[in-house]
Image: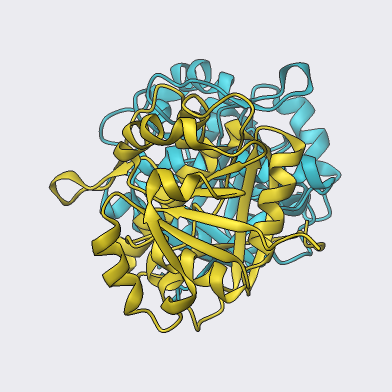
Chain colours: A cyan, B yellow
Amino acid sequence: MAARSTIAVLGGSGHQGRGLARRFAQAGMSVVVGSRDPIRARAIVAEWPAGASIEVDANAAAVARADIVVLAVPFPSIAPLLEEVRSYFLAGALVVDVTVPVTFSGGKMAMLDVPEHSAAEHVRARVPELIGVAGAFKTLPAYVLDDVEQPLDCDEFVCGDSEIARARALSLVRLITGLRAIDVGPLARARSIEHLTALAIAINRRHKIHSARFRVVGLASPD
Amino acid sequence: MAARSTIAVLGGSGHQGRGLARRFAQAGMSVVVGSRDPIRARAIVAEWPAGASIEVDANAAAVARADIVVLAVPFPSIAPLLEEVRSYFLAGALVVDVTVPVTFSGGKMAMLDVPEHSAAEHVRARVPELIGVAGAFKTLPAYVLDDVEQPLDCDEFVCGDSEIARARALSLVRLITGLRAIDVGPLARARSIEHLTALAIAINRRHKIHSARFRVVGLASPD
């Protein structure tokens, strides 16, 4: 029997990562939270109700044992983080980028101009060639993700640099209760997905909520 | 008593415009289809079940009598069209841009690089200063719009260059049965709305449907 898949969530004790890490653990995956400060991250994870089942390690060590590596760090940290961990990937690992290139300088939300057009393509340019890259979990509000007892009840958009990368990311999305996975095609579609997140943030701010997310109407089958 | 609002739908006999024109007429508005070829457009409109209540005029003449001017032409036609009609706007008119800068060259869908960042801002740059501009009806599939007996059953995203422009466009969206109007703020948000349309087109193509549209989850109130 194959061992359980190990998923590393880099930035897994942070704002966006902590909900994902706990939901992956709920789904029965072996989860390693990667952190640049594992001692501090261990203290955070120990406070989670399901924290005992989640390991914590330095980012590079987490990558070195993961079948799937989820990038859940702020966009500006991607380049230095991938520089640090790029030689640690297992052959056949998949990188799932969940980041969105937004800033909140001066209280205003704006999208950053990314030379590669999207965060996912920015990641692709910094990961070893043979490692697949997918974009997913980009449009889920941290506030809702974090409330792990609440089903997400929405759709999540998946793109990837190959059929295999996309299929693996679609399967990962389907592990999370209440999420419907929607295949939107090549990695370059990440740009549109990231704009969807910007729209969700704008809706949240304007309507004073924290939970705006999306459902596709008119799509009968799951994907 | 104030006369009924007159709405001109430029490109109203075309792919995206025809569903909108008929739905505005259903909602009780006085509708003028604007066309560069009014004779041909009159023949098209005469075939619509509710066509008798819809007038047809040349684009400039339609603008000259409209409280609201809806731009439903292909993106590349915007600049020459606005050049032609810009001196015909009534004082206090509102322009509602429904266009999306996509191309389908070689069978592949791609977003055009718009110097002003979005179609709505491209329009803003070409309309007289005192005329308000809003973006709306950008994410509705023509296929669903066109089937005017079918309620749309989705959300529509509205942005605008002033509170007044936005409020007027939100009211216009609410006239259409089955649409919830969602205020997403300033006109610059059009860029994200237009990416949402690109995502809907990608979903349609990948899943071999024509009806992908969106619903925001987590937003209790209508707006």
Residue at 48% over, 18% down: A79
Q: Quarter of the image holding residue A50?
A: bottom right
Image height of A112 relative to A150, above or below:
above
- Left/right of residue A142 with respect to residue B148 in the rendered view: right
Residue B205 image point, x, y percent? 29, 62
Residue at 76% over, 45% down: A204
- Residue B16 seen in the figure: yes
Residue B92 image point, x, y percent? 67, 38
Residue B126 image point, x, y percent? 46, 26
Residue A158 image point, x, y percent? 44, 52
Image height of A83 relative to B48, above or below:
above
Image height of A119 relative to B173, above or below:
above
Image height of B93 relative to B56, above or below:
above
Q: Quarter of the image holding residue B155?
A: bottom right
- Residue A72 seen in the figure: no
Residue at 61% over, 30% down: A73
Viewer-nearest residue: A11 or B36: B36
Q: How many marks?
A: 0
Viewer-nearest residue: B137 or A215: B137
Residue at 33% over, 68% down: B207
Judged from this view, the residue extending furthest toward the left is B106
Viewer-nearest residue: B210 or A136: B210
- Left/right of residue A112 with respect to residue A203 in the rendered view: left
